[in-house]
Image (cartoon, rainbow, N blue to C red):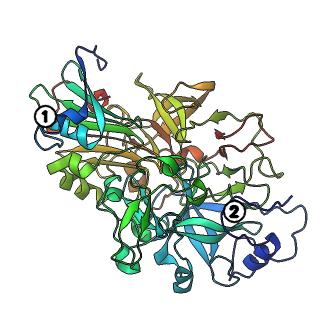
Amino acid sequence: MNIPALVRVALVCAAALLSAGARAELGGDRASVEHDAVAFRGSRLVAAQGLFERHEIVRADGSRLREYVSPKGQVFAVAWDGATTPDLKTLLGSHYAEYVAALSTQRPSHHVVNVATPGLVASVTRFQHNGTGRVHLPAQMPAGIASEDLR
Amino acid sequence: MKTPYTRLAGALLPVALLFGMLAGCGGGGSGGGGTPPPPPPTLHNMTSVTVDGGPNPMAPIPNILYATITVCAPGSLANCQVISHVQIDTQSVGLRLLASVLTPALAAALLPTIDATSQNQIFECIPFADGYSWGPITKVDLQLSSTESVSGLPTHLIEDPAAFKIPAVPADCPAASGNPNNPENTPASFGANAILGLGALLEDCGSACANSVPPIQAAYYACTAGSSGTCSNINLATTQQLQNPVATLVGADNNGVVLTMPAVASPGAATATGTLYFGVGTETNNHIPAGANVLPVDVTFGQFIYAVYNDGQNNVGTSNGALDAGSSAYFFTGQNPPFIPCTTDTGFYCPSSTVAMTTTVQGETSYQGPGMGTVVTIDLNVDSIEAILTSDPSLLALPTVAGSTSQGFVYGLPFFYGRTVVVVFEGRSSADVAQAGPYMAF
C-alpha cells in the first residue's frame, strides 16, 4: 500500500522560512526540511502518507526534492528528480563521507551509480539535462516501508 | 551532395581543403584516408564500435562501447591525433576529450573559446552520476571516418587544474554531480579517453543555457585566465555550446545515426564489435529497418520514452525510460525477490536464477508525459553479474545484466546487442519515416 490518500496538504512559501529550523540534512529533524526548501529555492508541499510525511519542494523549473519524515520527526529518506539536482554534501550531511567512500571502489559509470552500506542506501542517476536520485537510512525507515514506497 | 555547413560561428575551411587536410593527418581515420574518391559502391559513412574493456587493460569495464576518432588542431594539416577508446553515448551530446591523452603539440594548439560578453574564456562543467568533468570549450577539426568530418567543432577539453593551469572548479559543479569527490580527468576515472555524445538534441544544453535568468549552475562559465582565474555562470548562445558532432557533419549524413550491434549469447562474450553509421536513410547502408518501431522522445530533455515493466512476479512499475548506449546495464527499480542485490557489485542485481521480464515502451513527447503511439514490447532476461564474472572474468559484453535506479527504466547497452537502433535529431528528418525528429527507432 504505497499510495495513501492525502490527509493534509499545506503549501508553504520557502522565503518565509529563512529563520526557522536546524541545519538541513538526511537524519535531521522536521524543521531541517525548511532549510532545504530555501536552499533548493522551491515551495514546499507537505502530505501525510500513512506511516510517514512527505515534504515535496518544487522549483520553478519543475525540479522536485522530496524529504520523508518518520513519526519520530526524523528525515529518513530524500529523493529528487528534474533539471536541478540538490547539493549532496549538504543534503547527506554526516552521511556524506560514508556515501563517497562507498563510491570510490566502483567502476566508472557516468549515468547511474548505487551505494549500499549498512547505514545508507543510495541510487543516483544523472543524465546531461537532468537527474534523479534516492537516498535512505535503512535503520531509520519506519517498519513496513520499503524504498520502492518512497515516491 | 556536399553543401557547405554554415551554422558554426567562425571561418570554415572549404570542403576540399578540409578533406585534403584530414588525409594528411598521421595515420588518421579508419578508412585509410586516400585522397582519390573511393569507388562508387564503397561507402565510408561509418565506423567500427567495440566493447573491449576500455583504455586500461588492467581494469576492464564491461559493456562500454568505444570508437576511434581523429582530432586535429583547427585548420592544421599535420597537428592531428588518432584517439582510441572514445565512449559512444546516446544520452548526451557533444565531444569531450581528456586533455591528458593529447600530444603536447595538439593540447597546446587547442585554445579556449572566448565569451563575447565578458571577453573571458568559456569553460564548462559536466556533472555525472559518478563524478564531474571540468575544462575549457575549445574547437577541433574532427574526422569520424574517411568521408565524415567537421571543422571548428566546439569541444569540451577536460583538464586537471593542477596540471593545466586552469581555474579551480567552481563549487556548484561537483555539487551537481553524484560524487563531488571524483574529478573525472584521467582515463581511469573517466572510463574512456573521450566521450562522443550522439543523443537526439543538437546542443548539449540548448535554450536553458542560453536564456536563463540567472544563468543555470554547473553548466557554462566565463573564467579569467590562469590557475588563479575566477569563474562566473553565464548564458551562452546555442551556436557556441557543445554541438552534436554528427549534426554538424559536412554533407547530407547529419540527420542522425544508426547503431548496429551483433547479438551476444548469454552469459556473454569477451568482445563485441558493431557499426555506427552516420546519417539516417541518406545512403544505401543506413536505412531505418523495415517495420522498425519509431518512438518520439521528449522535447524537454530529448531522451525519454514511456516504459512499463513487469518482472515476471507481477511486480509492475511505470515510469520514464531511456535508450542509453552509454549505460552498462538495464537499470530499474526491481523488488526483492527476485531482484536480490549483489554483494560486491553494488547496485547490480544478482537473482538466484534467470529472471524473465516483459517491458513495454511507447514514445513520449513531454517529460513524465503520457505514452504516445504504438506500444512496443521488449522482453529481456536478467542474470547475476557476479555469477557470470565469477565463472568467466574475461567476459566484457554482457547481454543480461541489470541494476537499480530510483526512477525510470534505462535500457543500457545490453538492449543494443542484436539490434539496430536509430537516432534522428531534433529538427531533422529522414526520408525513411514521415515524421520529424527527435525520435529513436529500433
List x then y, in percent, for residue B42: 85, 63
**Residue highlighted by disc 2:** B47
List x then y, in percent, for residue B61: 45, 61
Query: Under tag 2, what secondary structure?
Result: strand
Most foreground residue, B72 or B397: B72
Instruction: Give the CA separation, mark 1 to mark 2.
Output: 56 Å
How many discs appear?
2
Is B235 situated left or right of A4 in this image?
right
The amino acid type, in three-letter code, at marker 1 is Ala
Most foreground residue, A97 or B426: B426
**Residue highlighted by disc 1:** A31
The amino acid type, in three-letter code, at marker 2 is Thr
Q: Nearer the viewer, mark 1 or mark 2?
A: 1
Work out whether residue B409 can be spotted.
yes
Most foreground residue, B99 or B378: B99
The residue located at (79%, 71%) in the rendering is: B14
> Numbered disc 1: what chain?
A
Q: Please give the label number shown on residue B110.
A: none
The residue located at (47%, 62%) in the rendering is: B394
> Numbered disc 2: what chain?
B
List x then y, in percent, for residue A78: 25, 37
Is B259 situated left or right of A22 in this image?
right
Is B300 situated left or right of A141 in this image?
right
Q: Are marks 1 and 2 on the same chain?
A: no
How dense is the environment of label 2, judged by Cα within 10 Å: few (below 14), some, or many (20 and up)?
many
The residue located at (14%, 50%) in the rendering is: A94
How dense is the environment of label 1, judged by Cα within 10 Å: few (below 14), some, or many (20 and up)?
some
Residue positioned most to the front:
B117
Query: Under tag 1, what secondary structure?
Result: helix
